[in-house]
Image (spheres, rainbow, N blue to C red):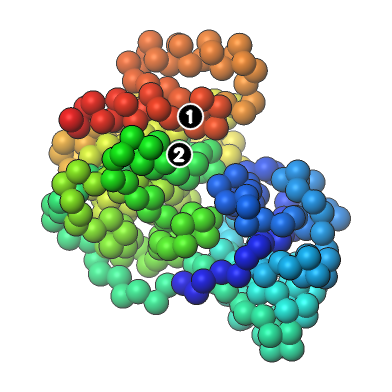
Amino acid sequence: MPVLRKPYLLFLADVTLPSDAKTGFGLRDWCGADVIGECRLPEGTVSLGLPELRPAEAAAAGAGSLVIGVAVVGGQVPRSWLPVLIEALDHGMDVVSGMHTRLSSFPELVDAAARGGGRLVDVRVTDRVIPTGTGLKRPGRRLLTVGTDCALGKKYTALAITRALQATGTKATFRATGQTGIMIAGDGIAVDAVVADFVAGAAELLSPANDPDHWDVIEGQGALFHPAYAGVTMGLVHGSQPDAIVLCHDPSRQTIEDFPHMPLPPLRVAIDRYLEAARLTNPAVTCVGIAINSSYLSDDEWRRYQVALVEELALPVCDPMRTGVDAITRHLLAHFA
């Protein structure tokens, strides 16, 4: 992937669900010094709390790239977004996209990039040759974040655990598997854009053989319980060969988001299903904690919920943004000491 020009203007388009702006939130929260502001269409209701700038204003302030900060279902770029993207290109900015639609498929964007001198950067495109998975055991330790649903904290949890491990002096590397993680880390493979037969192989490439005491912390994708995205999850589980998993959950959801006919499983059932799937390539896999997105809970509600889950599951329970993940990392290191 080419080096991205910073700072970024985050384009939030016309989204009305905060979960659809997870790319924008991720960049704001994990590389905020690289973000100059946000830009929305009139229909958009989601804000990151950043200065609102038009592309021309952002370019004048030194912005290098307009980053599409949303990840909507299907990953398509609608034509209604093009005027803003063209404005950025006409003012010399790059346009960076993690969507499935190739920016170069729009002749208007190609022409604008030629006029303004900016680049069209598709993060989901990889030039790596990806093999099929082998299932062969390789040295090094691996932790995979998994979830009851999409867009509820798998990336945040993986980033937080990586930093917490590094703070203890443990060798650890965040391995990005989605467009936002790649933009933060500067490397990775967007596994949901990989042909299905090669997802496990992509996961093996992302977390190769390493020192026995090194942890690869792998960003999870999708959910085993999702009717559309369970396939990418399974490939990632098998190729990662995780020694440990952390289950991520949003207690405000009773069903898969946007799929009201698909109820979420109890957390114990979710843990068991993930461990069952992961044992195909690592029979010794274990769950070392629960990461909760508690943003919809009050302080008292969070404390009661946390205590109840610890008692029910006998595992550390954290909110990466509210409490940090030290309890999970301590449990992880003690288990694998």
Residue 138 image offset from top left, x and y in percent: 15, 53
Residue 202 vertical placement versus 95 (above, below): above
Q: Are marks 2 and 1 in contact (CB under 8 Å)?
A: yes
* x 75%, y 55%: residue: 38
The answer to whether 326 appears left or right of 140 in the picture is right
Residue 326 image offset from top left, x and y in percent: 40, 27
On the rendered image, what quadrant is the C terminus found in?
A: top left
Residue 252 vertical placement versus 187 (above, below): above
* x 32%, y 46%: residue: 172
**Residue 87 visible in this rendered orientation of the protein:** yes
Under mark 2, the amino acid is: Ala
Residue 260 vertical placement versus 267 (above, below): below
Q: Categorize mark 2 by other alpha carbons within 10 Å: few (<14), some (14-19), many (20+).
A: many
Closer to the camera, 48 or 126? Answer: 48
Residue 236 vertical placement versus 300 (above, below): below
Q: Earlier in the sequence, mark 2 or mark 1?
A: 2
Under mark 1, the amino acid is: Gly
Closer to the camera, 253 or 312? Answer: 312
* x 31%, y 39%: residue: 169
Marker disc for residue 324: 1
Q: Categorize mark 1 by other alpha carbons within 10 Å: few (<14), some (14-19), many (20+).
A: some
| Secondary structure category for the residue under label 1 | loop
Residue 97 image offset from top left, x and y in percent: 60, 67
Residue tagged by mark 2? 160
Figure quadrant of residue 278 = top left
Q: CA distance from mark 2 to mark 1?
A: 7 Å
The answer to whether 164 appears left or right of 171 in the picture is right
| Secondary structure category for the residue under label 2 | helix
Residue 269 image offset from top left, x and y in percent: 35, 26
Closer to the camera, 99 or 319? Answer: 319
